[in-house]
Image (cartoon, grey):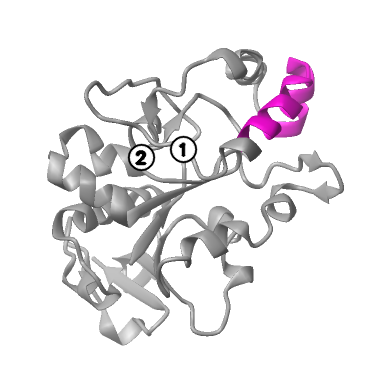
Amino acid sequence: MLAILSPAKQMREYPLSGVPLSRPVFAEEAAWLAALLRQREAWELESLMKVSPPLALRAFLDYQAFADRPADTPALLAYRGLAFQHLEPETLTARELRSASRRLRILSGLYGLLRPLDGVKPYRLEMQCPLRVGEKNGLYAFWGDRLCRELFREGDTVVNLASAEYAKAVIPWLRPGERLVTCEFRTRTRGKLTMHATAAKAARGRMARWIAREEPDRPEALRDFEWEDYVFEPALSDGGRYVFVR
């Protein structure tokens, strides 16, 4: 059973000594996309990615250096978003890191699909970016069913801890018999259930850490997850959606 996470916009270089890194499954596609983006000027990236001039310049410099930069940072430690801050990969034991490598996957606009110990380089490319790639209008069309097929290559169940933006790269390609279980985290406020984006991101990261530690082999085991008053709510859940409420 695998669990998928979204990447984060903020990245860092964090070489990990003594840990052999793997090559991303779609490394050739990533290099091809990076070469395509390397042809864009900073102002073009600003418009394409809808970011500020400083962020566009950073993306421009990253793509100019992409081909020559070593991929020496494990994917699990490269991203610095809220989910990864609460996953706390730096504090995982060797056993938990091996478990994470078997059970967690990170979706990526550039790399497609990453294992935790795949070596990556800094980049900026959201899945929803309207980048035209050959005859493909956007990254969803470019990746097509490849990410979904890779995820379900070794099993029939995937736990969805990704955002809607990234889950859209998988959901349309599900085949009969393939099960995607989406975990939702909601907060009860004045008698109503709402989803607070910040809290939900943190909870997704914490559940990913829990998966690395507890090594569940079926999604039903996720019902035991508890954190920051979040508990499984069976009345709101079904086979394809697990709702946790606090």
Magenta: main secondary structure:
helix
Say what secondary structure mark 2 lies in. helix
Q: Is residue 48 magenta?
A: yes
Q: Which residues are magenta?
A: 30-50
Locate residue 39 relative to residue 152 in the image: left or right: right
Q: Earlier in the sequence, mark 2 or mark 1?
A: 1
Circle 1 is placed at which residue position? 8
x 15%, y 60%: residue = 214
Image coords of residue 92 (percent x, y): 16, 40
Q: Does residue 219 appear in this view? A: yes
Q: Quadrant of the N terminus?
A: bottom left
> Looking at the rendered structure, which numbered label has been put on residue 82?
2
Instruction: Determine the image quadrant of residue 11.
Output: top left
Quick one: 116 or 44, which is closer to the camera? 116
Secondary structure category for the residue under label 1: loop
* Residue in view at x 16 percent, y 63 percent: 226
Q: Nearer the viewer, mark 2 or mark 1?
A: 1
